[in-house]
Amino acid sequence: MNALLGLAARSAWNRRGTLSLVLLSIALATLLLLSLERMRADVRQSFSQSVSGTDLIVGARTGSVQLMLYAVFRVGGATNNVRMTSVEAIAKHRAVDWVVPLSLGDSHRGYPVLGTTTAYFERFRFGEREPLALAEGRAFRGDLDGLYDAVLGAEVAQALGYRLGQRITLSHGMGAGADTSVAAGAAGGLPSADHADKPFTVTGILARTGTPVDRTVHVSLQAIEAIHLDWAGGAPMPGVGIAPEMARKFDLTPKQVTAALVGLKNRVAVFNVQRFVAEYPDEALMAVLPGVALDELWDVVGVGERALLGMSAMVALVSLAGLVAVVLAGLNERRRELAVLRAVGAGPRHVLWLLACEGALVTLLGVALGVVLTVLLVAAAGPWVQSQFGIGLKLVSPTASQWWVLGAIVLAGVVASLVPGFRAYRMSLADGLSPRT
């Protein structure tokens, strides 16, 4: 067997020019499959850890996926708001440790604006229960003196080029909005915007998290109330304008919020609190477990992931088909070589295994090169992906699914190599020695 493997290696080396192209295509197919599998695993982990340390998310009664979409991912909108009195009643439950209210509905140049309390920066967790951290500046104070403070997510600050101390204005609703940066229109005064009469000052920029927090502008709940004092029914009241300083004289206690994050003293009580929320008599509410709802949501958005893996598998199959085509095309040129082997005592079985070993060696080398390229790609692109998208690509040993991918490629290469091997097996000695015209 060792002699056969050595002969197969030398035979492949003699045809290294042609086979190197096949080897490269198999390496690239392996790189594509492994990198997609690595990306899929890390993206799913980042997706499932968009919020952690939160036991329940409370909102108006709707579907659990819809509640997660607007409360966590800032996608879509709530069917109804939640009265603040209801949130306070939930906070008084004996099993509840903390509650962080969330108010959504406004935007800044296409990015969602989240109204919340200072507890958000203390209680919100992502990933492996990692707290939010400020890359620059400070969080808003949550009082009247800091009424118009804004804290930007990392992506907002980077994409729009904002810095500390810059003034911005918000738009009503979730439209793309215009350029509402005060700095951009400083020469001509405040640009036209829905809430241009009440500009905010950037006081903090959050460190990148790889979650929807990066794409969010954070302000206080009182600020949300202040910018809507002279609004009614989703539109500004004609002839009414309340100056920013005058807004501080009003009662800015929020009456309604969009949703709330709830943390419990003991997770054993999660179903008890969930039932309490579902049976709350004053309005129709629901509470979902983030982990369960995120799994349901991933089942919805995971179709694209499976489609990409399917395309990668097709690339691998095309590469292996190229291996079969190259070996089959070379059989006619190798008729005399194989006939000489038959003449010196090699049987049809040895010829079959010779060609199978050649194909297996090319496949193994291609897979090994693909693994090396994957490691180099993750090591080189990992920091950039982390900084740009907040997805941490990890250099870890292959997972069980990746071992299955590698094994499937090698097995498919061996099986593909049997096709030309079986054809050579059926060639007779006379067929190889007699010239063809």
Image: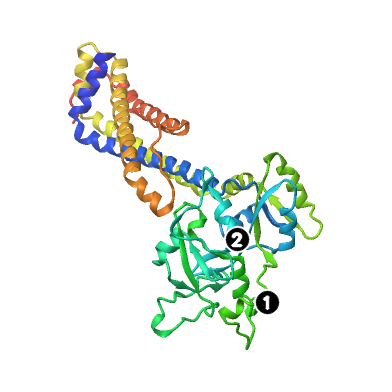
Q: Quadrant of residue 155?
A: bottom left
Q: Is residue 139 left or right of residue 292?
A: left
Q: Check disc 2 and report its element: helix, strand or loop.
A: loop
Can residue 323 be seen at all in this image of the molecule?
Answer: yes
Q: Is residue 275 left or right of residue 362?
A: right
Q: Residues within 10 Å of mark 2 (few under 14, many from 20)?
A: many
Can residue 322 be seen at all in this image of the molecule?
Answer: no
Q: Residue 117 bears which disc, if any?
A: 2
Residue drawn at the location 56% of the way across and 49% of the way down: 51
Residue drawn at the location 74% of the way across and 59% of the way down: 86
Residue 376, horizontal then vertical, whole percent? 31, 40
Residue 342, horizontal then vertical, whole percent? 23, 15
Q: Quadrant of the C terminus?
A: top left
Residue 390, horizontal then vertical, whole percent? 44, 51
Amino acid type, label 2: Thr
Residue drawn at the location 51% of the way across and 75% of the way down: 199
Mark 1 vs mark 2: give the one in front: 2
Q: Residue 431 bears which disc, if any?
A: none
Disc 1 versus disc 2: distance between alpha carbons?
25 Å
Above or below — where is 397 with respect to 100? above
Residue 126, horizontal then vertical, whole percent? 53, 48
Residue at mark 1: 233
